[in-house]
């Protein structure tokens, strides 16, 4: 009797392991991404003009990433993309200067996704929560930005960590090929430091920019 129970448990365990292995799917994807920034900033400190603020322009880029489906309803995802460069404009009293700087951002994001059952034939919705890390490897001030600041200006943005989430829909053409669309949001907030060489000497100005991006993607995926 014990032998039969042991054999049954062993058989169930093997079937469970086989099912788990069968559920493991690796997917790589590549496509387009549109970043709607919606940034707001606090007024610049030490500004010669009152209510000097910043706004950040939207941008398109190439998105890519990797998804590991480790269970029928669960996957882990690393979302990446070519680092886009955003135009930064003056707001408030800086608005007449137009584009005052440009900033490149690199925002890798990790998601844990939950996949629902098939909504319609070949249509599979999912949701995910995760963590975003954004760094700003390249920045520059424009001629207009230097003029507004009173001299040549160096700009630095602090790295940002924040929560992220997205919703998505997969169109599964066959076992290998799929089309994936997502809408993602992330908490991206950075302290900005601008150091200007003016006639009066070195002037340091600071502001906080809350980027509040919404990222829309459409990608072609290959699973194996």
Image (cartoon, helix red, strand yellow):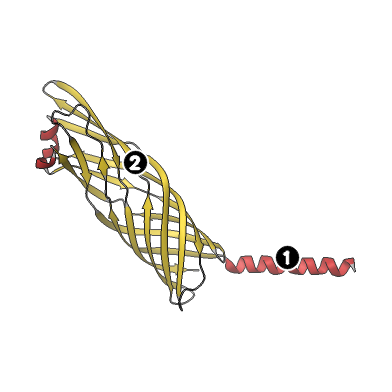
Badge number at residue 168: none
Badge number at residue 189: 2
**Mark 1 falls on what kind of element?**
helix
To which residue does mark 1 refer? Answer: 13
Is the residue under label 2 in contact with that under label 1 (CB below 8 Å)?
Answer: no
109 on left or right of 138: right
Hey, which residue is sitting farthest bottom in the picture? 121
Instruction: Work out whether residue 202 or residue 165 is closer to the camera in this orientation and state it.
Output: 165
Gap between marks 1 and 2 measured at Cα: 47 Å
Quarter of the image for residue 177 reads: bottom left
Instruction: Work out whether residue 129 or residue 24 is closer to the camera in this orientation and state it.
Output: 129
Residue drawn at x 40%, y 50% as measured from the top left: 108
Q: Percent x, y for residue 122?
A: 45, 76
Crowding near pointer 2: few (<14 within 10 Å), some, many (20+)? Answer: many
Instruction: Work out whether residue 223 or residue 11 is closer to the camera in this orientation and state it.
Output: 11
Of the residues tagged 1 and 2, which is closer to the observer? 2
Crowding near pointer 1: few (<14 within 10 Å), some, many (20+)? Answer: few
Among the two numbered marks 1 and 2 on one chain, the one whose residue lies closer to the N terminus: 1
Instruction: Work out whether residue 106 or residue 50 is closer to the camera in this orientation and state it.
Output: 50
Residue drawn at x 74%, y 68% as measured from the top left: 12
On screen, residue 62 above or below 139: below
Residue drawn at x 12%, y 41% as measured from the top left: 95
Residue drawn at x 16%, y 41% as measured from the top left: 90
Hey, which residue is sitting farthest right in the picture? 1
Q: Percent x, y for residue 149?
A: 14, 31
Q: Percent x, y for residue 97?
A: 10, 40
96 on left or right of 166: left
Q: Percent x, y for residue 215?
A: 33, 56
On screen, residue 138 above or below 45: below
**Mark 2 falls on what kind of element?**
strand
Q: Quadrant of the N terminus?
A: bottom right
15 on left or right of 200: right
């Amino acid at each position: 009797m014990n032998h039969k129970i042991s054999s049954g448990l062993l058989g169930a365990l093997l079937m469970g392991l086989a099912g788990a292995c069968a559920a493991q799917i690796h997917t790589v994807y590549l496509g387009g991404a549109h970043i709607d920034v919606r940034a707001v900033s606090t007024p610049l400190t030490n500004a010669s003009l009152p209510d000097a603020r910043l706004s950040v322009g939207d941008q398109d880029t190439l998105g890519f990433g990797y998804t590991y489906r480790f269970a029928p309803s669960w996957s882990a995802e690393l979302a990446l993309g070519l680092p886009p460069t955003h135009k930064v404009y003056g707001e408030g009293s800086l608005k007449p200067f137009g584009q005052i700087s440009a900033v490149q951002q690199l925002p890798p994001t990790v998601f844990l996704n939950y996949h629902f059952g098939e909504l319609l034939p070949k249509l599979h919705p999912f949701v995910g929560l995760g963590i975003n890390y954004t760094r700003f490897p390249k920045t520059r001030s424009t001629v207009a930005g230097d003029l507004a600041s009173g001299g040549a200006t160096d700009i630095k943005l602090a790295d940002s960590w924040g929560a992220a989430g997205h919703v998505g829909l997969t169109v599964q053409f066959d076992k290998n090929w799929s089309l994936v669309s997502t809408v993602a949001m992330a908490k991206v907030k950075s302290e900005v430091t601008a150091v200007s060489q003016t006639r009066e000497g070195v002037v340091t100005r600071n502001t906080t920019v809350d980027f509040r991006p919404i990222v829309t993607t459409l990608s072609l995926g290959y699973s194996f």
